[in-house]
Image (cartoon, rainbow, N blue to C red):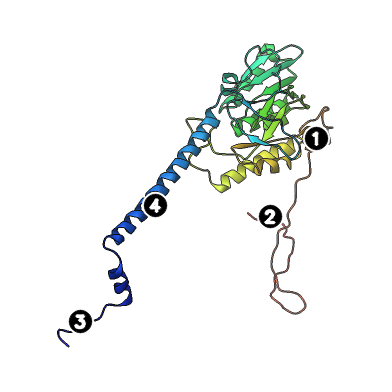
């Protein structure tokens, strides 16, 4: 009927019963809580980014406890090396200077030493493989039989090319006492005809990661595709098998985030054939590669059942 008012519903009565201004105060508190949450998240992002910048740009050695079996994960420092009370300075044939800081952060340099040894110190940059070829092509380097490594790693493709160059010239590799060979460096290390690691040497691996064009060796903001990462990982494992090392060592790399390093124990270096005091015989072709059967489907012969039956295919399919 005209003029009659509908009685307020339950929700409306509840709102009308609230003290004046309480709704506005509630809205204000909710907005304040959201703003505080956003500020907290921004602060956490800033702190994480600052820590990452410190890790990737640090040039001073970082004190770390020595790895032990079962306790082998350490931060990865792409421009310096770990330091500890039990670690001394590595001796690098032909090189007389600082072994950390700028020496490791700089592009890899090569130095001739006595007794057929040479040293390689610094980061493996894009183009380092060509620099090594030029170094070994010098008349003074014709007698080099061992390359002593002290490097935080860098370019995977260059490390692989360098490993193959060393093997083709029957040059051995060595990580000196208290030396550092991390990231892509173990791939170069694997190229040695014989391979030795000294007392207190750190040989460590981790996941392959993308690099930016302006800062080779540092994580890129744009991740590579899964296919490309898988292809690079397979290339690393193929190289290890080709060089006579056990490609299973790369499982440790794939399980270790790029910001960390899995330091191999002396026992693991031997078990994975990363250390080889003698050359492999001419018949050794590396650990056998796994073979996978291809499967096709066809009806069962007896009862015409259409259930899939595994049959080895005559050739592989892509």
Rounded to the nearest angstrom, the CA distance separating label 3 from label 2 is 81 Å
Residue 9 percent coordinates (x, y): 30, 77
- Rendered residue at 66%/20% (across/down): 120
Which residue is the site of mark 1? 267
Q: Nearer the viewer, mark 3 or mark 2?
A: 3
Q: Nearer the viewer, mark 2 or mark 4?
A: 4
Q: Are marks 2 and 1 in contact (CB under 8 Å)?
A: no
Which mark identifies residue 51? none
Which is nearer the N-term, disc 2 or disc 4? 4
Which residue is the site of mark 4? 33
Quarter-of-image position of residue 202: top right
Q: Nearer the viewer, mark 1 or mark 3?
A: 3
Residue 261 percent coordinates (x, y): 65, 36
Which mark identifies residue 316? 2
Quarter-of-image position of residue 297: bottom right
Which is nearer the N-term, disc 3 or disc 2? 3
- As drawn, the residue found furthest toward the bottom would be 1
SS at mark 4 in the image: helix
């Amino acid at each position: 009927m005209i003029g009659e008012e509908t009685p307020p519903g339950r929700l409306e009565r509840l709102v009308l019963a609230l003290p004046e201004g309480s709704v506005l105060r509630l809205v204000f508190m909710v907005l304040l809580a959201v703003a505080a949450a956003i500020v907290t998240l921004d602060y956490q992002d800033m702190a994480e980014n600052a820590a990452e910048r410190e890790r990737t740009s640090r040039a001073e050695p970082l004190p770390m406890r020595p790895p032990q079996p079962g306790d082998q994960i350490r931060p990865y420092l792409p421009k310096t090396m770990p330091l500890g009370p039990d670690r001394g300075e590595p001796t690098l044939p032909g090189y007389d200077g600082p072994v950390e800081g700028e020496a490791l952060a700089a592009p890899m340099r090569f130095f001739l030493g006595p007794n057929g040894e040479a040293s390689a110190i610094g980061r493996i940059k894009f183009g380092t493989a060509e620099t090594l070829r030029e170094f070994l092509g010098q008349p003074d380097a014709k007698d080099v039989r061992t390359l002593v490594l002290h490097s935080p790693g860098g370019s995977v493709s260059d490390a692989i090319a360098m490993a193959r160059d060393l093997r083709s010239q029957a040059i051995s590799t060595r990580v000196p006492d208290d030396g550092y060979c991390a990231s892509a460096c173990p791939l170069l290390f694997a190229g040695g005809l014989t391979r030795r690691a000294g007392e207190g040497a750190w040989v460590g691996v981790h996941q392959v990661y993308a690099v930016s064009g302006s800062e080779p060796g540092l994580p890129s903001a744009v991740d590579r595709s899964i296919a490309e990462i898988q292809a690079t990982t397979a290339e690393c494992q193929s190289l290890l098998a080709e060089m006579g090392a056990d490609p299973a060592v790369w499982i440790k790399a794939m399980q270790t985030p790029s910001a960390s390093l899995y330091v191999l124990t002396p026992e693991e270096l031997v078990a994975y054939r990363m250390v080889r005091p003698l050359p492999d015989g001419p018949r050794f072709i590396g650990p056998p590669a796994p073979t996978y059967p291809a499967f096709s489907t066809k009806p069962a012969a007896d009862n015409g059942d259409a259930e899939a039956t595994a049959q080895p295919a005559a050739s592989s399919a892509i």
